[in-house]
Image (cartoon, rainbow, N blue to C red):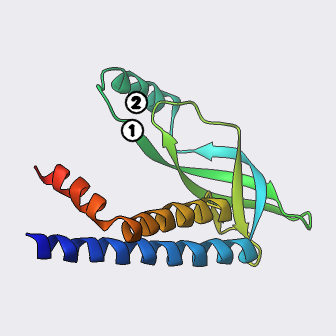
Amino acid sequence: MIREMDGFITILLAVAIFVTLISVGIGFDTMHRFSPALAKLVRSDYSAMERHYDHLGQQGDEGGVRFKRVSMRIEFDTPDQKDVRAHHRRWQLAGEPQKSCYFIWFDKENPEKTTAYGPGFWLVLAVASASVAVTIMLDPAGWEEMIRGFWV
């Protein structure tokens, strides 16, 4: 069991380092290729009736927050005053009313390519995964004990 656990801790450390490197790469790529904008909601596939039923359904949930993937049509202006209409998808808390404006990131070369995750999201993820990797390196026995607690 101890050798299996050592292997598992090694794999966990490798995954944490991998996630850190990928997140840093995506964060810096997003920083250079994407630009922020405030987009106005034009149309959405999340109707008022669907939001109402989702809100009622969430009233009885004992725990857990449900999210819904929403497709929307947005419009925004680029810094060079170009009007852009784009299809955008994002996660939204189920049952919550939609906002009229959203903060987005768009590709400078292809403004119709948008994302809700800017460089801040990716760099925070990198810091979180790096801190997991560091704590695994500093205290592998503590992680082993915690994992064993999950299996018992």
Please tell me the numbered disc located at residue 88. none
What's the distance in space between the residues labelled 2 and 1, CA to CA? 9 Å
Nearest to the eye among marks 2 and 1: give it: 1
Q: Is residue 152 above or below residue 107?
A: above
Dot 1: few (<14), some (14–19), or many (≥20) neighbours within 10 Å? Answer: some
- Nearer the observer, 149 or 79: 149
- For the point 40% across and 30% down, the residue is 54
Q: Residue furthest left?
A: 1
- For the point 84% across and 63% down, the residue is 78
From the image, tell me which residue sits under label 1.
66
* Residue 28, x across and y down, in percent: 67, 75
Query: Along the horizontal axis of the image, is 84 left or right of 89?
Result: right
From the image, tell me which residue sits under label 2.
54
Query: Along the horizontal axis of the image, is 110 left or right of 54?
Result: right
Q: Which three-letter amino acid code belongs to the residue tagged 1?
A: Arg
* Residue 77, x across and y down, in percent: 84, 58
